Image (cartoon, rainbow, N blue to C red):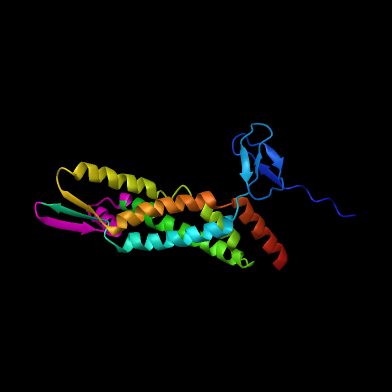
Amino acid sequence: MPAPTPPELVACHDCDLLSPLPHLSEGERARCPRCGSVLFERKGHSLDYSIALALTSLILFVLANVNTLMRMNIGGRVQSGAIISGISELYAQGFWMLAALVLVVTILAPLVKILAILYVLAPIRFHLRAPGAIRVFRLFETLHPWAMTEVYMLGILVAMVKLKDLASLEAGVALYSFAALILVMAATDSSLDDHEIWERLGHLRDKTA
């Protein structure tokens, strides 16, 4: 007689209590029986919304990196630059560690995060599992703390405030695209149902085993 299959468990994010994974319908949420915090919720149309938002993020990312970020006029001398030119300038000035950090958190981490979620979700939409999808999805979740585009945006705004008395500043297309990218990436994270993706990856692995 085969041994009974142990129930799937989910850990509370606040008190670490392990609870049996409940079956939820769209729009329902499960709460921890000990502390009452939300264990997870089943979001409606999560897959379609996340794919659409990730594609939008990719378009905004390209616009933010191929256009001018800001144009500055100091005493008739006009200077403009993009995100990558700012990183190059930091490196040229000898701040190579800061340049590397800005490169990672504003370009590499967001780009890898966007491509990773598209690589995992797009095949699932057609009931397929991409090679290495589980490892790629783990990478996507690991990159959450490193895609700090909002910190870079805050630095730009602070610089604009400090320079407003010294120069005439004009925001470029890249600045608006970058601001929109921050909002759309936050919406992607909010719409994504991690539990649903892990379940779908598990089911697709069982089908192909």
> Relative to 204, is 166 on the left or the right?
left
Residue 27 in percent (x, y) is at 63, 47
Residue stretch rendered in magenta on the structure: 75-98
Residue 143 seen anywhere in this rendered image of the structure = no
Q: Quadrant of the C terminus?
A: bottom right
Residue 203 in percent (x, y) is at 69, 60
Q: Quadrant of the N terminus?
A: bottom right
Q: How many marks?
A: 0
Residue at 61% across / 39% down in the picture? 38
Residue 12 in percent (x, y) is at 63, 39
Residue 167 seen anywhere in this rendered image of the structure = yes
Residue 187 in percent (x, y) is at 48, 51
Residue at 27% across / 50% down in the picture? 95
Does 155 sit above or below residue 107? Answer: above
> Relative to 81, is 47 on the left or the right?
right
Q: Is residue 80 magenta?
A: yes
> Relative to 149, is 141 on the left or the right?
right
Residue at 69% across / 48% down in the picture? 24
Does 95 sit above or below residue 51? Answer: above
> Relative to 149, is 123 on the left or the right?
right
